[in-house]
Structures are given as structure tokens and as C-alpha cells.
Image (spheres, coloured by chain):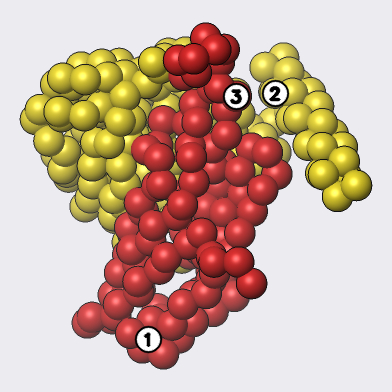
Amino acid sequence: MAKSSIKIRAKEKGGVTTVKTLITHPMETGLRKNKKTGKLIPAHFIEEVTCEAGGKKVFVAEMSGGVSKNPYLSFKFTGAGKGDEIKLSWVDNKGGSDSATAKIR
Amino acid sequence: MNTNIKRRRFIKGSVAASTLGAAAGAGLLTPQTVLAKWSESAFHAKSSANALKNLLGSNAAEASSAIKIKAPDIAENGAVVPVSVTSGIAGTESISILSTGNQTPLIFNAKLGPGAKGFVSTRIKMGKTGDVVAIVKANGKLYKASKAVKVTIGGCGG
């Protein structure tokens, strides 16, 4: 399998799980120009990142090209314990997607 | 052959997305149905007010000191500006991040599910010096807070 585009760290402390994630993605706005050809680089960015824990969607993030390249995302939620699994997936504007799971530590 | 199929799917997808956007713009769809999918009309809006109207149905937000934005005062590189938003408002449903200096101000919208805390942290691009605005939706009302960020080198466009 190709290397996943998603890196996840999930840590539980005092009932609150903190998730930190890095996704490898170009995040082109569609406004940038290719300096050599002068043509616009077509937009290519993640539209939605979803995090599921225990079969429930705990966090959904909608993004535009305004999020930096290789987006970093962090959020917190309650209701999960150590050893539980979370699933993170993203979809971009070209129909590309990826997902990864991680155990809460 | 595989690439062919992919391209076909992409063309189909983009056509569907554009018709959806047009329909939403014409007010044919209720906000709920639009929100179920990626809010194209909101993310493509050129002004903060329009973006908020398209995203949350209103742009009337009350200033709140319970929302804390953590962002640098001066961002040397506009392509990567770390922003954290913490909402102390009970019942926070969503957190949106806008940058007033960008061509399309709406950058980020987090919908919080059951159990999610009012906290989100990410890195955004800023075209030029402007305000980073956080909009929090809680109990059907909108609250906002903003922070001015000076950008030395813009991060949008060439």
C-alpha cells in the first residue's frame, strides 16, 4: 500500500481526547500562477475532513484553498478512552480521497 | 484506461457541483440541503458577509469575549499562519475561520459533533494584512471575535 497521506496523533487525558493531524496535500487555491508558463494552476484542495470515533462523526471540517499546504488540524473531543480507534478521512475537489485510522493513546 | 475513468468521474463531479452552486445561488435549495454537502457558494463568496449568509444563513454576529483566537500579531509568511480558536460558549455547534484580506474570505468551517470541544487549530493562508475572524455558532446564534494579523509576504497568488 502506498504511504498514507495522513498522520494522526490522538491522546486522551482526563476524559478529553486531543487529535492532531497532518495531511499531505498541495492545497492549490486556483489563483496562483505558474511562473514559467503564466497559466493559472488549477485549484486542488481538500474540501472536507471527517473524523469518526465509535461510529459517530465527532468532527467535520470544511476547507477552502485558504488553508495552508499540507494542512495541520487539531481538535478535541470527549467520550472516547485509551485504545479506542478513530477514523479520519478527507475528500478533495477533484474527487480524490484518503482515510486512516489511529488508536487513542 | 484507469485515468480515463477517473477523468470521466471528475467531469461528472464538477458539472454536478456547478449546477448545485447555481441552484443554491438562485435560492432553489433550502440551506439545510446545501449544508449537507461542501458549501461551495459560501467558500466562493467574495465578501465575508455573503460567505456567512451562504454558510450559516445570517451574518449578524454578536461580539463575544468567550472566543479566543490565537494567531501571531505579525505573520512573516502569509502562506502559513497558525490559528487556534477556542470557544468558551456552551453548546458550540460550529467554528468558522475567515480572513478579511483574502479574495475568498471564508477559509475554514468546523462542524462539531457530539462530544467535540469548542477548540480547533489549523494553519491558514493570508493574502495580505487583515483580520482573522472567528465565527462561533451556538444555540442558533452567531458570535464572533477577530484579531488583526499583519502579513509581511502574502500567501495567496503569485
Give how far across and how far down residue B56 sits, in percent: 49, 32
> Mark 3, residues whose alpha carbon is within 10 Å: few (<14), some, or many (≥20)?
few
Confirm whether circles 1 and 3 share one chain: yes
CA distance separating discs 1 and 3? 42 Å
Spatial separation of the CA atoms under disc 1 and disc 2: 40 Å
Q: CA distance from mark 2 to mark 3?
A: 19 Å
Side (left or right) of B93 relative to A98: left
Secondary element type, mark 2? helix
Circles 1 and 2, Cβ within 8 Å, touching? The answer is no
Q: Are marks 1 and 3 in contact (CB under 8 Å)?
A: no
Give the number of the disc on residue B21. Answer: 2
Q: Disc 3 marks which amino acid?
A: Pro
**Label 3 chain ID:** A
As drawn, A2 above or below B154: below
**Amino acid type, callout 1:** Gly
**What residue is drawn where x is 35% and y is 67%?**
A19
The foreground one among A38 and A12 is A38
| Chain to which mark 2 belongs | B
- Colour-to-chain, yellow: B
Mark 2 residue type? Gly
Q: Which mark is residue A81?
A: 1
Q: Given the current orientation, which residue lies at the most extreme right position? A: B1
As drawn, the chain in red is: A
Please tell me which of labels 1 and 3 falls first in the chain: 3
Q: Do the residues indicated by labels 1 and 2 lie within the same chain of the protein?
A: no
Q: Position of residue A61 (x, y in %)?
A: 47, 48
Crowd rating for badge 1 (residues with CA inside 10 Å; few <14, some 14–19, many 20+): some
Label placed on residue A12: none
Res. B63 image quadrant: top left
| Residue situated furthest front in the rendering | A36
Label 2 crowd (10 A; few <14 / some 14-19 / many >=20): some
Q: Say the numbered circle drawn on residue A42.
A: 3
